[in-house]
Structure formats: C-alpha cells, structure tokens
Amino acid sequence: MKFITEKILDQVICKRPLNSHKGDYGKILLIAGSSQMGGAALMATSATVHSGAGLVTCATSATNKTALHTLIPEAMFLDYTDQAALVEKISSADVIVVGPGLAQGQTTIEILELLFLEIRPTTALIIDGTALTLLAKYPKLQTQLPKCPLILTPHQMEWQRLSQIKITDQNDPTKNQDVQQKLHATVVLKKFQSEIYHQNGTISQLTIGGPYMATGGMGDTLTGIIAAFLGQFKQVERSLALEAAVYLHSAVASELAQTRYVVLPTILSSQIPFFMARYSK
Ligand SMILES: NC(=O)C1=CN([C@@H]2O[C@H](COP(=O)(O)OP(=O)(O)OC[C@H]3O[C@@H](n4cnc5c(N)ncnc54)[C@H](OP(=O)(O)O)[C@@H]3O)[C@@H](O)[C@H]2O)[C@@H](O)CC1
Ligand SMILES: Nc1ncnc2c1ncn2[C@@H]1O[C@H](COP(=O)(O)OP(=O)(O)O)[C@@H](O)[C@H]1O
Ligand SMILES: [Mg+2]
C-alpha cells in the first residue's frame, strides 16, 4: 500500500502554456441529477469548472436548467432525455461522469445503455452514485460496460452492493482488489482514508481528510474534480492525475476545517482555484 502525499500535486498541476485555449483543458460531460437530486449535478459540475476543466456540459433533468444556468453559467445544459443531443456530446467528450443524483428508474437505465454503446474507446468514464447502484442491481449492465478507461468511485455501501464484499470485510485489500481486477476498472473506495485500486495492481491510500467532510454532495464534488484533472493534465499518466484529484479534494477540506466545524462541498469547490495556484510553478 502506497500513501499519497502532497508531492503528487507538484507532479501533476502545471503552469499553463501561454498559447493554449479552453479546448486544451478537457471537454467534460456530466450525466447527473434527477429532478429530486439536482444538487448532486450542480455540485459535481461546479467542482469540474472550479478545478480547471475547459468546456463543461451537464446533461440533467430539464427541471435543473435554470438552477444550472444561474449557479454555474460557465457550464452548458443538456436535457438528458434528448437522445440525439446526448449521443453527439458523448461522442465528442474527453471525459464523462455518470451517476451523481440520477434516479433509479428506466430512464437512467436507458441512458446508461446508450452511453456504454456510444462512448469512444479513448474517453475516460467515471461511474459514481446511482449508476454504481444500478450496475449492482442489474448484472446485465455490467456485461455492457465499455472497453474505455473506467474509474468507479463507490462509497463503502455502493462497493458492498457491487462487489458483494460486506463493509466489515472491505478492510482486506486483497478481497477488494480481486473484484476490482475482474471489473477491469480503477476503483476509488471512498471512506475515512480512501483507497485507490489501480489497474496495474498497485494500491494507494489517503492519510488526510476527516469527518468534517461528511456532508451530502462531498462525493459528487470529488467526481467533478477527478473529471477536470483527467481532462486537463494529459502530460502525466491517468493514474497520477487521479491520485492528485483525490488528494486535492481532502487537502482543501482539511485546510478549510482548521477554521470550520464542517466543510460544505460548495465552499470546498470555491476554494479550489486558489489552492491549485500554489502548485502551478
Ligand atoms: N443534494 C443532492 O442532490 C445529493 C444527492 N446524492 C445522490 O444520491 C444518490 C444516492 O447516494 P447516497 O450515497 O446518498 O445513498 P446510498 O447509495 O443509498 O448510500 C447510503 C447508504 O449507504 C450506507 N453507507 C455505509 N457506508 C457508507 C459510507 N462510507 N458513505 C456513505 N454511505 C454509507 C448508509 O448508511 P447510513 O447512513 O444509513 O448509516 C446508507 O444506508 C447518489 O446518486 C448521490 O450522488 C448524494 O450525493 C447526497 C446529496
Ligand atoms: N470521516 C471521513 N473522513 C474522510 N473522508 C470522508 C469522511 N466522511 C466522508 N468523507 C469523504 O466524503 C466523500 C463522500 O462521498 P459520498 O458518500 O459519495 O458523498 P455524496 O454521494 O453525498 O456526494 C468521500 O470522498 C469520502 O471519502
Ligand atoms: Mg456519492
């Protein structure tokens, strides 16, 4: 088990070339947020924008359109029931997030099937929240998983559902790794001291972060940071950009917690550009 340290931020976050534009920093598509859980889509999208992604689109329920445009005007809106528009965005994205705040019904299953069919083999796919729960519930969906780079970001219950490993047994890394390898995916197992199971067999772990992060939306925020890091830091291996994103999320929270009892996901996102500036030498 390797511990992730602050060094990862120096390794990954770099100064931007003067002659560059938004297209160089990642085209990110988030498919997130039902009418009841619009907040998950907003928090994930906000984190993606604040972490430096160049072009961000949020495919969500039409009920979230005004909120998205009001709170994050940098992001583009797409109605996730508009199949033709969704397919177009899926086939042009560099990184796709699916799952935060989606409902567990037929609409989401159809979106997942369409996504798995249409995603390009080079596009990284981050699967979180409800999408993980549906993968666990419908094994047929697992057989349709695309061959592109896959990153799963379960919390302990989502991992229990998907892997069938009880939360009490998840402290055995070999058990987690066994299932992760069968899924042909990188797994970020989120908990106190989250663990990353990489596809090359290495396992890395956080030693920072704490219970001040235990507010709904904190995981949605992490998915957004991961998407932005994979989309823009293409000069390093994907596994390093992922580790940097996971570290940054808890590092910002831990710094904010010095003066706060709880760290709200929206506050965390707002601080990301200031925090990243320290590492862009
Ligand atoms: N504002 C919004 O729109 C928000 C929308 N959200 C969206 O909601 C969707 C559902 O996601 P979810 O995580 O809220 O629910 P679910 O998958 O049922 O898991 C909860 C169950 O697991 C258990 N549990 C055990 N260990 C755990 C652990 N380490 N971490 C967490 N839970 C743990 C836990 O145990 P308990 O708390 O009961 O003790 C409970 O029984 C998803 O799409 C998400 O993106 C949220 O982001 C919130 C803000
Ligand atoms: N006690 C804790 N210590 C460290 N990190 C925590 C703690 N509680 C929550 N977190 C972090 O907060 C995030 C919660 O993710 P998740 O449960 O998916 O939230 P949500 O779905 O509500 O957005 C994870 O990154 C997790 O590691
Ligand atoms: Mg979550």
Image (cartoon, helix red, strand yellow):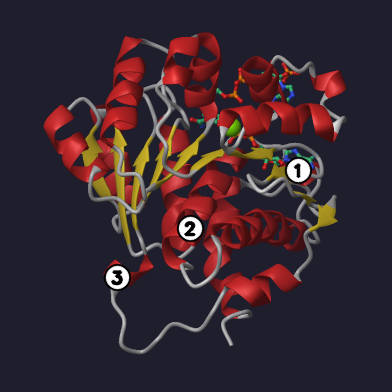
Task: State left or right for residue 44 relative to residue 196.
Answer: left
Q: Residue at x 48, y 58 (%)?
A: 230
Residue, disc 3: 22
User: Which label was assigned to residue 230?
Assistant: 2
Image coords of residue 85 (percent x, y): 15, 37
Regarding ligand 1, which quadrant of the image does it lie in?
top right
| Callout 2 secondary element | helix
Examine the image and state in which quarter residue 79 appears.
top left
- Look at label 1 and name its amino acid: Ser
Query: Which residue does the image show at 47% across and 52% down from the upper left?
Result: 227
Q: Earlier in the sequence, mark 3 or mark 1?
A: 3
Q: CA distance from mark 3 to mark 1?
A: 31 Å
Nearest the viewer among 47 and 108 is 108
Q: Position of residue 145 (x, y in %)?
A: 43, 27
**Nearer the observer, 260 or 56:** 56
Q: Residues within 10 Å of mark 3 (few under 14, many from 20)?
A: few
The amino acid type of the residue labelled 2 equals Leu
Select label 2 or label 3 by which is in front.
Answer: 2
The alpha-carbon separation of the residues under discs 2 and 3 comes to 14 Å
Is residue 207 among what the camera can see?
Answer: no
Of mark 2 and mark 3, the one earlier in the sequence is 3
Q: Quadrant of residue 54?
A: bottom left
Residues marked 2 and 1 touching at CB (< 8 Å) = no
Disc 2 from disc 1: Cα separation: 19 Å
Q: Split into 4 quadrants, where in the image is the C terminus?
A: bottom right
Q: Residue at x 33, y 10 (%)?
A: 106
Q: Residue at x 28, y 29 (%)?
A: 117
Question: Where is mark 1, residue-wise?
Answer: 194
- Is the residue indicated by label 1 positioned so its CB lies within 8 Å of ligand 2? yes
